[in-house]
Amino acid sequence: MSTFLESHERFFMAWAPVFIYAGVIFTLSSLSYPLPFLEPMQRSVQDWILHILEYTILGILLARGLCVTFTEQPIVLYIALGTLLGTLYGLSDELHQSIVPLRQASPYDAAADAVGTFLGTTIWGVILKGIRIKQAQAPKGFHQWQL
């Protein structure tokens, strides 16, 4: 019974941040004026940069969730699958925005979302590579994470 609970707890800890963050993205996309305090920054910073930053965070969270769920897989798998999932979510977000008053769907925003997701999953991949190298150098019997 404890293994069942442990696996569910592990799944929850891996994916709760992804679902919460995706919920924040969805909620902001539901608003005609999502963040009025960002308007001055949106005038000085291109919108696509904000999309890349937003989806870089999602990419990191997706790659982390995949890594915790499917341990000891090749890093490229986390990057590829995380990028695919994040890109699909970005496309669904653009479709969602197309039905929100005063919002519009943009293929450029979807492309920026995909780039951000790839960037985020790659950042996680680099971090994971460093962790795996340190684990390989650790003395035998030393407690190691399974990542």
Image (cartoon, helix red, strand yellow):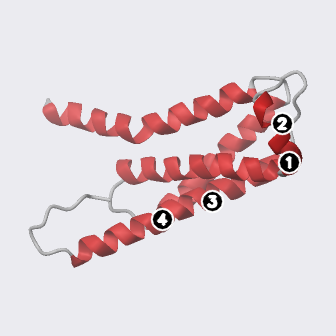
Residue at (38% x, 63% y) in the render: 73
Q: Nearer the viewer, mark 3 or mark 2?
A: 2
The three-letter amino acid code for the residue at tag 1 is Pro
**Mark 4: amino acid:** Gly
Q: Quadrant of residue 88?
A: top right
Q: Secondary structure at mark 3?
A: helix
Residue 63 visible:
yes
Residue of label 4: 125
Q: Position of residue 115 (x, y in %)?
A: 70, 58
Q: Which mark is residue 138?
A: none
The Cα atoms of the two marked residues, 3 and 2, are separated by 26 Å
Q: Which quarter of the rendered picture does the C terminus lie within?
A: bottom left
In the rendered view, does 122 fall on the left or right side of 26?
left
Residue identifier under label 2: 39
Instruction: Determine the residue located farthest toward the left in the rendered image.
Output: 141
Instruction: Answer yes or no: is residue 96 visible.
Output: no
Q: In which image quadrant can residue 106 be found?
A: top right
Alpha carbon distance from label 4 to label 1: 27 Å
SS for tag 2? Answer: helix
* Mark 4 or 1, closer to the camera: 4
Q: In front: mark 2 or mark 4?
A: 2
x, y percent for residue 130: 38, 71
The 10 Å Cα crowd at callout 3, few under 14, some 14 to 19, many 20 or more, is: many
- The crowd level at tag 2 (other Cα within 10 Å; few <14, some 14-19, many 20+) is few
Q: Nearer the viewer, residue 83 or 31?
A: 31
Q: Which residue is mark 1?
A: 107
